[in-house]
Image: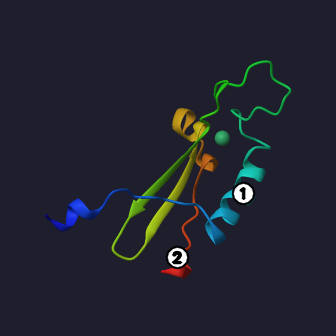
Amino acid sequence: MSELNLVEAYTFRLMGVELEKFLAWEEEHNKTCPFYDDGTSPICPSGAIGGQMTFSFTNTGLGTIVVVECLCYTVHKNEKGKINVTDFDSW
Ligand SMILES: [Zn+2]
């Protein structure tokens, strides 16, 4: 059995400094994001089931890079719709 067969799952979590960075950014971003459903629009462009935020975890030899991308970045390339929340100090 090779060593690769011992890996049953990869799990990624957003916690600590990275979670704090994301939540602070999200709160500010939602104030101007065209895809944020603030309850004033009859239809949320991101859809009834959400899916507005995409979380990317990139494994490196030093640590995991965490990038969060809002739908407004994906669709409109809104530069303020993407943030790297990686806690580089923990590497
Ligand atoms: Zn957005």
Q: Say what secondary structure mark 1 lies in.
A: helix
Q: CA distance from mark 2 to mark 1?
A: 17 Å
Whereabouts is ligand 1, in terms of quadrant? top right
Q: Amino acid at mark 2?
A: Phe
Q: Is residue 78 left or right of residue 29?
A: left
Point out residue 91 in the picture as x, y percentages from the top left corner. 48, 80
**Does residue 38 lie above or below 84 as drawn?**
above
In the rendered image, the residue lying farthest to the top is: 42
> In which quadrant will I find the N terminus?
bottom left
Find residue 48 and report its image quarter: top right
**Does residue 23 lie above or below 89 as drawn?**
above
Q: Amino acid at mark 1?
A: Leu
Residue at figure coordinates x 54%, y 32% from the top left = 75
Q: Is residue 22 left or right of residue 10?
A: right
Point out residue 43 in the picture as x, y percentages from the top left corner. 74, 19
Residue at figure coordinates x 80%, y 18% from the top left = 42
In the rendered image, the residue lying farthest to the front is: 1
Residue at figure coordinates x 76%, y 32% from the top left = 37
Among the two numbered marks 2 and 1 on one chain, the one whose residue lies closer to the N terminus: 1
Residue at the spot of label 1: 23
Q: How many marks?
A: 2
Near mark 1 (Cα within 10 A), the count class, few <14, some 14-19 or many ≥20, is few
Between residue 55 and residue 7, name the one nearer to us: 7
Q: Say what secondary structure mark 2 lies in.
A: helix
Find residue 17 and report its image quarter: bottom right
Q: Which mark is residue 88?
A: 2
